[in-house]
Structure formats: C-alpha cells, structure tokens
C-alpha cells in the first residue's frame, strides 16, 4: 500500500508549494535523517494536527497529488502506454495547462516510473509559475 503514496522528497516539495490537505499517511523525519518512517493514519490538516512538530509532512497519494496540481496550478497530467515493442511496454507522461502549453517524456519503463517522473516535472513547473 505504501506504493500508493508519493515519496518523501516529493512530499516535502509539495509542502513547500502549499499542500495542506487531509491525507491517510504522513512522513516523520529525524535529525539524523537515517530513517524516514511512513505512518498510515488519517490526518486533517498539518496546521491543526502537527502545529507543534516541524519534522512531519503529509504523504498524499499520487492521484491526490495530480488532482491538487490540476486544481491549484491548472496543470493537467496524463500517464499512458506509448507502444508495445518486442513485448516491452513503454510509458509516457504528458502535462498541459489551460494555455495549451505541453511538456512530455517518452520511453519510460513502467507506469510507476512515469508517475514519479511526471510528479517531479509538475513540481518543477509549479515552482516556476
């Protein structure tokens, strides 16, 4: 089930961009950063639940993150198979906004790789808006 949630590094980037929505999971980091435990529990808002702790951030799911970028930044993303070549599926992502600007990447090896690469690119695009 942990694979449904975005990685810690991207969760921190979303926090910096203003993400603060209810989630089923969160990350806790410690000063030594040796281990970043993942906890599965519903929290309402970082501001409400963890106002006394600086080392906690939400762990949204990939679909929740993609929806948030669509609603907050107008960035619409698609992940889909590209082609079947010699029994090997290739995947790609595409990102557009309401101005019909496009960004895309092809030949990714799995849908999970496409999701992560798309999320990383969405973060970059949102930081530049």
Image (cartoon, grey):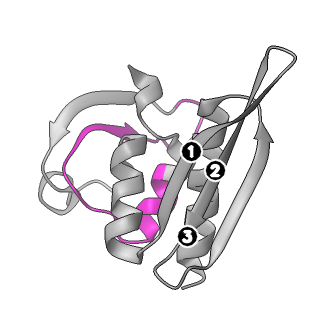
Q: Is residue 79 visible?
A: yes
Q: Is residue 58 visible?
A: no
* Residue at disc 3, secondary structure: strand
Q: Determine the image quadrant of residue 1.
A: top left
Which residue does the image show at 56% across and 79% down from the upper left?
100
Image position, residue 12 (x, y; %):
48, 56
Asked if residue 34 lies in the magenta stretch, the reply is yes
Q: Determine the image quadrant of residue 123.
A: bottom right
Q: CA distance from mark 1 to mark 2?
A: 4 Å
Total count of labels:
3
Image position, residue 3 (x, y; %):
47, 25
Which residue does the image show at 34% across and 61% down from the upper left?
68
Tell me which numbered mark, 1 or 2, is placed earlier along the sequence.
1
Residue that mark 1 sits on: 79
Residue that mark 2 sits on: 93
Which residue does the image show at 56% across and 44% down from the upper left?
79
* Residue range (magenta): 11-35
Q: Is residue 87 above or below residue 41?
A: above
Tell me which numbered mark, 1 or 3, is placed earlier along the sequence.
1
In the image: residue 85, left or right of residue 12: right
- Labels 1 & 2 near each other (Cβ < 8 A): yes
Q: CA distance from mark 3 to mark 2?
A: 10 Å
Disc 2 crowd rating (10 Å Cα; few below 14, some 14-19, many 20+) is many
Which residue does the image show at 16% across and 37% down from the upper left?
42
Residue that mark 3 sits on: 96
Q: CA distance from mark 1 to mark 3?
A: 12 Å
Q: Is residue 118 above or below residue 109?
A: below
Image position, residue 99 (x, y; %):
52, 85
Disc 1 crowd rating (10 Å Cα; few below 14, some 14-19, many 20+) is some
* Residue at disc 1, secondary structure: strand
* Residue at disc 2, secondary structure: strand
Along the line of sight, the residue nearer the viewer: 9 or 51: 9
């Amino acid at each position: 089930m942990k694979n449904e949630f975005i990685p810690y590094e991207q969760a921190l980037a979303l926090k910096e961009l203003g993400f603060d929505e209810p989630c089923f999971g969160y990350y806790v980091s410690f000063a030594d950063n040796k281990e970043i435990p993942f906890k599965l529990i519903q929290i309402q808002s970082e501001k409400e639940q963890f106002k006394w702790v600086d080392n906690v951030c939400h762990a949204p799911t990939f679909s929740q993150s993609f929806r948030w970028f669509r609603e907050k930044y107008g960035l619409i993303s698609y992940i889909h198979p590209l082609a079947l070549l010699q029994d090997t599926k290739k995947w790609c992502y595409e990102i557009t906004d309401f101005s019909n600007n496009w960004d895309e990447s092809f030949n990714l090896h799995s849908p999970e790789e496409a999701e992560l690469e798309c999320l990383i690119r969405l973060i970059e695009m949102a930081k530049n808006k």
